[in-house]
Every structure is written in structure tokens, then in C-alpha cells.
Image (cartoon, coloured by chain):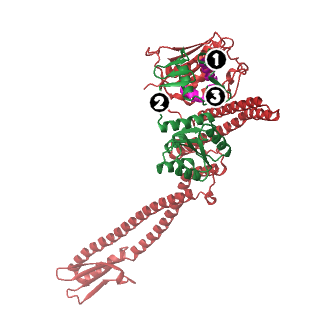
Amino acid sequence: MRALLVEDDAAIAEFVVRGLREGGFSVDHAADGEAGLTLAIEHAYDVAIVDVMLPKRDGLSVIDELRRRGVMTPVLILSARRSVDDRVKGLQAGGDDYLTKPFAFAELLARVQALVRRATRAPEPTTLTVDDLVLDLLSRRVTRGDTSIDLRPREFALLEYLMRNAGRVVSKTMILSHVWDYNFDPQTNVVDVLVSRLREKIDRPFEKKLLQTVRGVGYVLRT
Amino acid sequence: MFSAPENDSRPLFTRTFGLRIALWYATLFIVGAIAIVFLTYVLTATSLAQRDRQLINGKLGQYADVYQRGGIDGLTDVVRAEQRTAPERLFVRVVDRFGSEATVVAMPDGWDPASLETGSLQLSDGTLVQVGKSTEAREQLLARFRATLGVVTLSIVIVALAGGLLTTRSAVLPIRKLTQAVQQVIRTGRTDARVPVAGAAGDAINELTTLFNAMLDKIEGLVTAMRGSLDNVSHDLRTPLTRLRGTAEMALAGPVDLDRYREALADCVEEADRVMVMLNTLMDISEAESGAMQLTREPVRLADIVSRAVDLYRDVADAKRVTLEVRLRPDSTTGGVGDVVVMGDRARLEQVAANLIDNAVKYTPAGGHVDVEVQREGGYAVLSVRDTGAGIPADELPRIWDRLFRGDASRTERGLGLGLSLVRAIVEAHGGTVNVESQPGQGSVFTVRLKPDTT
């Protein structure tokens, strides 16, 4: 997978490039809009991550120009502004998703992968498997080894989300928006509570622990 | 912030505008006055000429009679007799029928025959009787009249110009004051200037002034709120940033130890997240308070909002062994249950409900109850959250809405102290109210009242 990052802040660029490489991408980086545009036109990237505020040429105009030239690489827009207007403008310019700074890298990676998945139209699986944990999306049954596990709807939704992102850390904010469709931070950590309930059911009775907490970042399901 | 071009400091526009109006006014006035004067003159002149003509015609008839009866001598006698007593002297002449012999009966001294107004009557034998009158007196009268009219016209022009300037000056004065106030605001960036409202209520300028002041009020409010929130934000960020920096610094200064580093980094990420949430919430509060928050209003069933929020906290309440229940009370007017609808921003109202439930669950000990009620009461759509928690001491009650205020009992709990401020800001941005009743030791009730959607 090839990814292009157009970002002028060196520190942000460095950690995003490193993170994406660790996530299995080969990454090119451009520090201004003109360079980014040239790279995006000359190479076939699977995904581009474009900051809005850029020297020489702003991100929205880069995307605009790309779309005008028929380059349909999926684009994730990064912006320091959080207003709905900016989001709408970004998506209208031809961006495919929008992320506000400051962001959690886990969320950026998840969104980038979702864009790639959407673009390649990978067939939708009917069962998700992590180690001996199996989740059947059609019958909505969960088993680990030979044991059938009874989950409540929210627990099921959380497990499905974690399994779809198996091996990747998902943040509390991402869980909150995927499982409850809430986009603000409740003061009490409702995610912690749900995760510990799920852990009770899928991990506690078994020797091998799959659901791990990455302190400060989020949760990950891995073998 | 703004810069005005230097030569704009003079109220050029209003000045030329006023002058233009004054000139228009004076021109119309003068044209009208001159028309009246001209008409008066013409009427006077014609009526004077007409009077002379009548006199001449009368005399002609009379003298023709006298001539036919007494001949030229008789006429001479009569004319002489008449001219001795009559105030007006006339020129009288008789011309025979061949036009060869003309007898001047009377010719006043010093008369110029060219400036005579004359009339003639031909008798049946062809003799022509002529009577003339000098126009000199008439001309003198008209000349005096013209002089008077000239003076009058001149004074009218002066009065018109002066009056026009004065009236437009007083009409333009409020506009000029307004212009000055605007320029002052632009030049200094200070929005506390106000234009004094003068004149009768309801006149156009007055209305404009009032509106302009109202606009300044609004701008000033926004600017103050912005400044206030900027102050608050910079102040509120200092504490978490100090913690962030301190944690990193301590880790770096200590012995090289991977586990300690890991711990410190995790602390830093969590602290950074907290800063981010705080920043977003503070922005939300300021936007809602200043009226800048964008609310996507749609009909929203309060029961839906509440059930989603309760769903979010269900597990938390269960884990704490707090009973969390929703009670949908029948509508006192329609008797329907759960159909209390308000016009509001769904996501924001969900945030209100979630924050109130969050608080209630947080401060209610194991075995307690949290009841969320939705009802229509006294013309309001009412959402209330009742808990059997610790309650709020009376001296803390008024301050719980303040940003970052945390009561003594709440300090041990996780939170920013922004939840209730946000609740109030959002509810008030919706035109509603929120209040609290609390009995220390027994619990609290938070009540949100919104205008129900009646459509």
C-alpha cells in the first residue's frame, strides 16, 4: 500500500510517516502543496493524507486540482479547525474523510485503512476471527474455542469493532462514536466499563488474554 | 484591527450630501418665488395698460360727440375746460378725412409723441379723432415695482439658501454623529462608543441610531465574550500543561528506566487528551454563550434523547449498583406518553441529557436511584434528572454552573468541572432554562425546561 502525506509541520509529519510505515504502508512525504500535488499526479497512491493549511498551495486546492485531473486517490483531510463548515468545505472539495488536529494516531490509521478498504471494495466477511475467538456476523453468535459466549448488543458491537480492527489500537473516542454513535466525551469513562464487561466474558475464563489495554491510547485485540 | 484612509476623517459624504439637499431645496424655493413675482408683475402691467385703454376709449367717444356737434372750436373749449380740472392731461388731435390737415386740440408740455398710448375713432364723414395718453407715469410705477420685486427676490434667494442649509444641517447632523461614531469605532477598535438618540421616537434617523447602537451592543458582547473565553482558556490550560510538562520532565530527569518512561508517556497522552477535551468544551461553552453556536434545529422527541443517554450510562450505573430509570409521564393536556417534542439540536440536547445523567450517576452511592423524567408541564417540555446522591451544600448551589467550579464532594471524582456550565450554555442557547434543587444528604433534582414544539 502506498500512501502520500502532505504536511508542513515536520514533527507531525515524522510521527505520521513512522506510524504509517509501521502500519505496513510505504509512505512519501511532501512539505508543501505544490510538491504534494506533483507527487500525487505522478504516482498512483492508494491513499493521501492532506493538511489544509499548507505553504504554496492550500490543501483544499490540491484536492480540487487532483479531482479536476481525474486523480481519484482517496484523501483524508487534516485540519486544525473543527467547525462544521470547514468539514463540509473539505468534503465538498473532494476529500473523502476529515480529521481534526490534535488527533490520535490510532484514529488516523484506522481512517486511512478504512479509506483504502472502501476504495478496493474488499468483500465483506461474514465471520471475524481472532485466534480462537470467532464472531459470526449473520447469526450474531460469538464462540471462543468450543465455548459459546453470550453477549449483550453493546458488547457485541464493541467486540465486532475491535475484531474488524484486530491488531490495531482503537481509541476510546473511536469506540464511543462507533458503538454508541456519540461524538463527545462523556466525563465518566463509559468505554472502560463496557470494555471490562466484555473482558469478563471473552477473556477472563480463558488462559490467553486477547483484549489488551494500551494505556493512554486505547484498546487492541491481538493474539 | 481596521484602518481608515487618512483623508476620510472629514465627514465629506455627509457634508456634500447636506449641501446637495440644501441646494435642491433652495433652487425649488427660488424658482417658485420667481414665478410668483413674474406673474404678479405681468398682471399688474396688463391691468395698468387696460385702465389707460379704457380711459382713452371713453374720451374718444365723448370727444367725437362734442366734435360732431360743435366742430373743432367746440371740442377745443370742452377739452380746455376739462384739462383745467381733470388730474390727467391728454393729447387730443383731429385729422380731416384726407389726412392732410391735422389740428392738435391739446398737447401737454414736454410730451414726447413717441411714448404716447393713443386711440383713434373715425367719424362717418371720414374725420379721425385721436386721443393719447402718456405712458410715462405707468412706466415709472412699473419701474418702482420692478425694483421692489428685485429686492424681494434677492431676499427670497438669501432666505431660501440659508433656510435650506439650516434645515439640512439639522437633518444631517444625526447622520454626521453616526458617521463620527462609526469612524471612532473603526479607528480605535473600541466598541463602547454609542450615538445619543435624539428627536422624536419612530423617526427614520432615530431608528437607524437605535439599530446601530443595538449592533454595537451585540458586537461588544461578542468581543467581550471572546476576550473572556480567551482569558479563561489560557488560564485553564496552564494547570494541565504544567502537569504535562512536569511529568515529562520528571521522567527525563530520573534514572533511565523503560517502565517509568512508558508510564510517564501514557500520563502525558492522557493529560493531552484531557487538554483537548477541555479546549473543545470551553469552545462549546463560549460559542453557546455568545450565540455563535450553530444549532441544527429539528423536531426532537425528548424521550429519544433520554433513552439514548440512559443507554450510554446503563453499564456504568449497573457497575455502581445504582438504579437508573426513565419515567415518561403522561402529557397533562393530551394524555399521551413520551411524545414531548422540542425544536432543537439533537446532538447538543443529547449532550445535555448525558451530562446531567453522568453527574447524577457519579454522585449517587451504591444502592441509590437516578430517575430521568420527561413530561410536559406548565407549557414547557421538561426533562428532569433526580438522584439520591450526596446533594449540594446551599453555599455551593449558585456556583455549580461556573466554569471549572468543583464542589468539595466532587474533587475526588474524575471530571473537568465543565459539564454543568456546558449544560446551561446549551439549554440557554435553545432559549430554555435549567435549575437545580438540592437537599444535602438526600439528593438533587436538575430540571431543564424547553419550549415545546407545537407544530
Residue A113 inside the magenta-drawn segment: no
Q: Nearer the viewer, residue B70 or B331?
A: B331
Same-chain status of marks 1 and 3: yes
Q: Type of residue at label 2?
A: Glu
Callout in the foreground (3, 2):
2
Which chain's colour is red? B
Quarter holding the C terminus of chain B?
top left
Q: Which mark is residue A207?
A: 1
Dot 2: chain letter? A
- Residue bearing mark 3: A218
Q: Earlier in the sequence, mark 1 or mark 2?
A: 2
> Residue at the spot x=60%, y=42% of the render?
B219
Q: Nearer the viewer, residue B108 or B272?
A: B272
Main SS of the magenta part reads helix
Element type at marker 3? Answer: strand
Q: Give how far apart the Cα atoms at labels 3 and 2 are.
A: 25 Å
Q: Are marks 1 and 2 on the same chain?
A: yes
User: Residue, x 51% and y 17% (percent of image)?
Assistant: B375
Q: Within the magenta stretch, is there residue A191?
A: yes
Residue B447 percent coordinates (x, y): 58, 19
Q: Residue furthest left?
A: B124
**Circle on res. B333:** none
